């Protein structure tokens, strides 16, 4: 240390520059930097900064800050969530079970901007939005009843599927719940009803019923949200005994519901799964006899077959999710081992198998965010200014 000389402290950086630099950093670092000083805390927790961080860092993410969240059904019938850390080569570095999920044994939907929708409608109608990075939880109000519906005791077999996403037009997070029911001791099916939750108003509204009788998969496995539109795979029951496959879509911005036919893929198919490929809606089918995989994509209302890949050398496979680029995740073999499959190079990477797991219900590509459910009015104003 030099004696007799004063050390000149440079002027701090302009706040605008500090804000811009911070907006490109990962969430884990930002959560630590909140403790640096009061001014940094104010910057990082502001809704304007959270919106900028989503635009800068979140939309230009690095694979090293990404992990896979795997959603399992255990042999005890419980729903478990595992976190898999991956590197730039998609190699699993480590994994652990996330035991601090706020709603025990809940279904999981998402993520959207780092937020999950948790649904346990069979137990006290418990629903919430959850940000695992900040551990912030927003409990949703109870789902409203369908107008003019008699007592629920009059109905049996009530089931739900759901969706969660961000409406870029209204800058609002929305949850879609589709309910079905039938009369007790009756085979009569009633039209599916749509309910929409808006975070900006913190309330549910009844959208209406579908004009036809559809059956949607109750485990929500065939659900995709792409560019503000939800898609569910189901069957049309209106034709009597023949169940025509269909895709039901709901546009968050326009409130428009549509149904569309599936492509003319080779049948019979043992597995039919909705996915995403090159930013387009995709359909993956696995032939039940000939052992091959077909991948179709939807562009401007037309289906196009992209690939047909033989699968006999891999044993029994089941598509689970799209990872990135040309890579998909499958369950393979009698042990349902998770594998990463590149459909172009046809290279397989085994991701490992977790003991005491009965089935994998979904895999989500997750990145943490700072999105908060607090001060919602400020949030909507900040979102509008960020555009």
Image (cartoon, grey):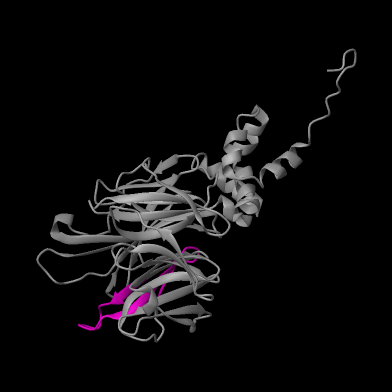
User: Where is residue 109 drawn, in percent x and y?
Assistant: 40, 56
In which quarter of the view is residue 268 placed? bottom left
Depth check, front residue: 348 or 149:
348
Residue 177 visible to an observer of this rendering: no
Q: Is residue 213 visible?
A: yes
Percent across and percent down for residue 132 are 46, 44
Judge by depth and name the residue closer to the eye, 177 or 59: 59
Give me the residue at 66% from left, 33% from top. Answer: 40
**Magenta stretch contains residue 248:** yes
Residue 10 in the figure: left or right of residue 131: right
Q: Can you tell which quarter of the image residue 104 is in?
A: top left
Q: Is residue 374 left or right of residue 193?
A: right
Give the magenta range: 233-259
Is residue 240 depicted above or below 184 in this figure? below
The N terminus: image quadrant: top right
The picture places residue 49, in percent across and down from the top left corner, at: 63, 43
Counting from the top left corner in percent of width and height, residue 128 is at 38, 46
270 or 101: which is nearer to us? 270
Q: Which residue sits furthest left? A: 185
Residue at coordinates 25% horizontally, 45% vertically from top-left? 124
Q: How many marks?
A: 0
Q: In the figure, is residue 184 to the left or right of 227?
A: left
Seen as rendered, the residue at the extreme top is 4
The C terminus - image quarter? bottom right
């Amino acid at each position: 240390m030099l004696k007799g000389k004063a050390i000149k402290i440079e002027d701090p950086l302009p706040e605008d520059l500090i804000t811009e630099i911070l907006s490109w950093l990962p969430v884990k670092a930002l959560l630590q930097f909140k403790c640096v000083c009061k001014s940094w805390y104010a910057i990082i927790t502001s809704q304007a900064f959270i919106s900028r961080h989503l635009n800068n860092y979140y939309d230009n993410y690095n694979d090293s800050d990404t992990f896979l969240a795997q959603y399992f059904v255990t042999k005890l019938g419980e729903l478990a969530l595992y976190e898999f850390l991956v590197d730039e080569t998609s190699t699993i570095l480590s994994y652990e079970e996330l035991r601090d999920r706020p709603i025990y044994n809940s279904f999981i939907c998402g993520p959207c901007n780092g937020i999950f929708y948790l649904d346990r409608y069979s137990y006290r109608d418990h629903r919430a939005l959850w940000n695992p990075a900040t551990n912030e939880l927003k409990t949703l109000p109870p789902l409203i009843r369908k107008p003019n519906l008699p007592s629920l005791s009059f109905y049996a077999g009530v089931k739900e599927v759901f969706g969660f996403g961000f409406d870029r037009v209204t800058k609002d997070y929305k949850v879609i719940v589709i309910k079905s029911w039938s009369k007790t001791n009756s085979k009569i099916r009633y039209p599916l009803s749509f309910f929409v939750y808006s975070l900006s108003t913190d309330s549910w509204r009844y959208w209406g019923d579908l004009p036809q009788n559809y059956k949607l998969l109750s485990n929500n496995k065939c659900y995709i949200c792409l560019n503000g539109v939800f898609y569910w795979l189901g069957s049309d029951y209106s034709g009597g005994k023949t169940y025509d496959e269909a895709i039901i879509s709901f546009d968050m911005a326009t409130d428009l519901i549509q149904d569309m036919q599936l492509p003319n893929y080779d049948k019979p198919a043992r597995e039919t799964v909705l996915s995403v490929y090159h930013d387009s809606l995709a359909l993956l089918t696995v032939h039940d006899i000939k052992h091959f995989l077909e991948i179709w994509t939807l562009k401007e209302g037309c289906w196009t077959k992209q690939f047909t890949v033989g699968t006999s050398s891999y044993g029994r496979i089941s598509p689970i999710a799209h990872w990135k680029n040309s890579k998909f995740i499958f369950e393979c073999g009698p042990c349902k081992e998770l594998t990463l499959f590149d459909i172009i190079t046809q290279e397989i990477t085994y991701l490992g198998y977790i003991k005491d797991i009965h089935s994998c219900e979904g895999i989500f590509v997750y990145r943490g965010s700072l999105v908060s459910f607090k001060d919602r009015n400020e949030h909507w104003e900040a979102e509008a200014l960020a555009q």
